[in-house]
């Protein structure tokens, strides 16, 4: 299953800007959801559940913060 | 959807002071909520839920601590 | 709202000792709660809830550990 | 029990690309599940539970983000 | 309240061995609980709750792992 | 209590291989459980609870990922 989904867009952690790095973090987090739940219909059905649940929204924020930490370090913080 | 929200204000992790870095961490965490739940009315309705729930307030603190770790490293801890 | 609360006491992550660094971690974590729930009466009412709930106490510990990691790195671990 | 499962495929954190590093993070996270619950039938039975539960999918994302941080550092971010 | 509890034993993150570093991580995590819930009787009453709840035991493990990461870095991993 | 359990096997974070480092992470996480719940009978009784609960299995994975990050850094990622 893992082989069917591209987990790292462009196969690189390097981005030109922090904004693009942040978008990559969001995408990489979503791709893990996709590889764990490959059925698009089920994923779509879950969207209102997590998007209207503050605890889940906070947890999504925690995950993306962790992904972003790695991407930011990879880019030497775009300094 | 990601493209409609600016995820990193000023497209930079660099701030003049720790205080500004901390404010950036808060903003970046909120922007992830915004990109995941773009409907402002729904977000507003959730506010009392998380703002009066100690477990969620703690989880928000955890997320912001993680965001801040990255921003602090980016700024070499303002040393 | 963020502007009304000082998020980083003394606007610095540098402290003279690990003990002071740990106290700063506790304060910074509490200030995030304060900025998210600015009503002191509501915060006070929540205190017994989290202070008598072991799961929340553990979660507070997790948050402070994350804050402290950043402060300790900022101070080069007081070596 | 630990001895019966290979926890790190190829006994190395080094991969050629970020994509392979991400796949390794997914595998290493799954192998911890396997060593904790060695019964394949029970693991299989749990799959629909977590794959249709957004909170669990988010938590899986958090775990893989943490594993990936280590693998990415090991590979100097494939720079 | 913070001032009444010593949060970092010996006011130092440096230890002679990994074992002592791990014990320090356990103590520092417990001291945060103590500063948040200063009433020893209430803390004692909570013990069976978390010590017989696997989810809480795992969460304690997560917190101590985070504390230990900082202490280990402070000691350059006792290399 | 802490004194009765060896928290870091061999009192060292250094291992010859990533595989051994991963096994050390698993052991160190389990030893924290042991020091918090010293009664072997109670620990044994909890096993089916967490081993058949996907949320707890994921949380175990998160804890071990955090422990492993420290061990991997201590070993300079076995490069």
Image (tube, coloured by chain):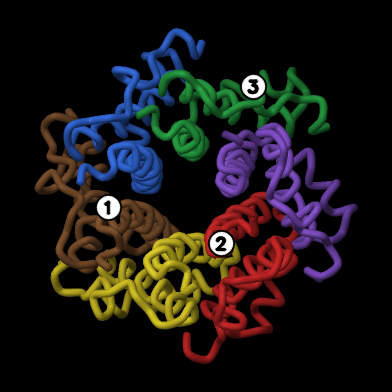
Chain colours: A brown, B yellow, C red, D blue, E purple, F green
Q: Quadrant of the N terminus of chain A?
A: top left
Seen as rendered, the residue at the extreme top is: D4
Return the residue at label 1: A74
Residue drawn at 20 percent across, 40 percent down: D18
Q: Is residue D2 above or below residue B13?
A: above
Q: Is residue B15 above or below residue E41?
A: below
Residue drawn at 53 percent across, 64 percent down: C74
Between B7 and F4, the residue placed more toward the observer is F4
**Separation (CA) of disc 3 from disc 1:** 33 Å
**In the structure shown, which secondary structural element does the residue marked by tag 2 occupy?**
helix
Return the residue at label 2: C67
Quarter where residue F33 is shown: top right
- Asked whether disc 3 touches disc 2, contact meaning CB atoms under 8 Å apart, the reply is no
Return the residue at label 3: F9
Quarter where residue D7 is shown: top left
**Separation (CA) of disc 3 from disc 2:** 28 Å
Seen as rendered, the residue at the extreme bottom is: C4
**In the structure shown, which secondary structural element does the residue marked by tag 1 occupy?**
helix
Residue drawn at 21 percent across, 37 percent down: A35
Same chain for marks 3 and 1? Answer: no
Left or right relative to A44: residue E59: right
């Amino acid at each position: 299953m893992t082989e069917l989904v591209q987990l790292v867009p462009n196969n690189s952690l390097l981005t030109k800007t922090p904004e693009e790095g942040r978008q990559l973090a969001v995408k990489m987090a979503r791709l893990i959801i996709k590889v764990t739940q490959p059925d698009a219909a089920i994923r779509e059905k879950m969207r209102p559940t997590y998007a209207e649940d503050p605890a889940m929204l906070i947890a999504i924020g925690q995950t993306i913060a962790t992904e972003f930490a790695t991407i930011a370090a990879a880019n030497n913080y775009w300094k």
